[in-house]
Amino acid sequence: MSANTSESSDDSHSTQTRVRRSKVWEYFEQNLVEADDGFKAVCKYCQIHLSTKSGTSSLRTHISHHCHAIGEADRKRFVATLKKPIENFVFDPQLCRQRMIIHEGIKKIRELLKHIDSSPSRIQAFNQIAMVNGLPTKRGIALDIPNRWNSTFRMVREALKYKVVLNSYANQNAEIAPNEQEWTKAQSICEFLETFEEATKTVSADSIWLRVPTSE
Ligand SMILES: [Zn+2]
């Protein structure tokens, strides 16, 4: 196989060219090596031959975890590229708009909870509405922690259970509650995040919503 064939339109190369858009190919030799069981990618650092049959995931794992010859700086640079697809999510205009609605809704939820939590009489008023609606009363309301998405998730999930209470509290006290569209978006983002919550439960098992006062 000759070198520098990346511009070739030869059919036998088209599959390889497509697959090679992955960043991981910067860490493997340009040309694959043909073996009995298909093409193999050769690590630039340790020369190991890895199968490319099931895509690039084994190549990524090799560079990010197993290669003993790659330098720490190169490995870190590669690991950083693995996080890119999540950032792309932000730049889709429609998703961006939806995120704005979600963001606006969550902001209103947070502000309303902050307002209620700021005085015992407000919590009492909240609890009275909760009782009327057959929901458990609360001793206090904890807000989310900045940059901890799972604490925001738990705050919103709990707020959704108390949606009727929060709406009517806001109504009675001239406060702002999320509108229906914002509640609906909050609901859908919660359902989406539930899967991640399951995965990270073991990491932080602290209860965010129910803050038990320590001074009592
Ligand atoms: Zn290697």
Image: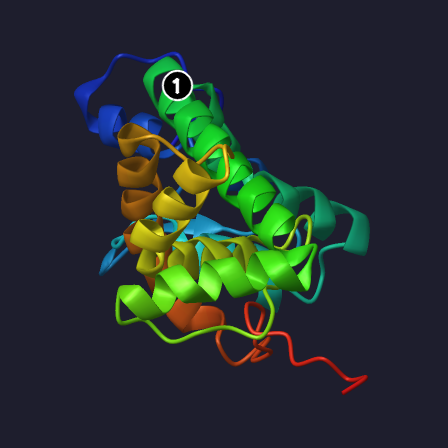
Q: Nearer the viewer, residue 39 or 193?
A: 193
Report which quarter residue 58 is drawn in: bottom left
**The furthest residue to the left:** 11
Indicate the position of residue 178 as horizontal and vertical percent values. Answer: 40, 34
Indicate the position of residue 184 as horizontal and vertical percent values. Answer: 26, 38
Residue 180 visible from this viewpoint: yes
For the image shown, how many numbered marks are present on the structure? 1
Residue 29 visible from this viewpoint: no
Where does the N terminus fall, quadrant-wise? top left
Relative to 166, 14 lies left or right? left
Above or below for 194 versus 20: below
**The furthest residue to the bottom:** 216
Q: Nearer the viewer, residue 51 or 18?
A: 18
Report which quarter residue 211 is drawn in: bottom right
Indicate the position of residue 53 as horizontal and vertical percent values. Answer: 25, 53
Relative to 146, 183 lies left or right? left
Kindly identify which residue carries mark 1. 97
Q: Which residue is depicted at the point 26% across and 54% down?
A: 54
SS at mark 1 in the image: helix
Q: Nearer the viewer, residue 130 or 89?
A: 130
Q: Which residue is depicted at the point 80% across and 48% down?
A: 73
Above or below for 170 versus 142: above
Q: Nearer the viewer, residue 9 or 92?
A: 92
Relative to 6, 132 lies left or right? left
Where does the C terminus fall, quadrant-wise? bottom right
Q: Using a 10 Å C-alpha cutoff, classify the residue at mark 1 as few (fewer than 14 neighbours), some (14 to 19) or many (20 or more).
A: few
Indicate the colouring scheme: rainbow
Q: Amino acid at mark 1?
A: Arg
Q: Which residue is depicted at the point 49% across and 70% down?
A: 200
Relative to 98, 216 lies left or right? right
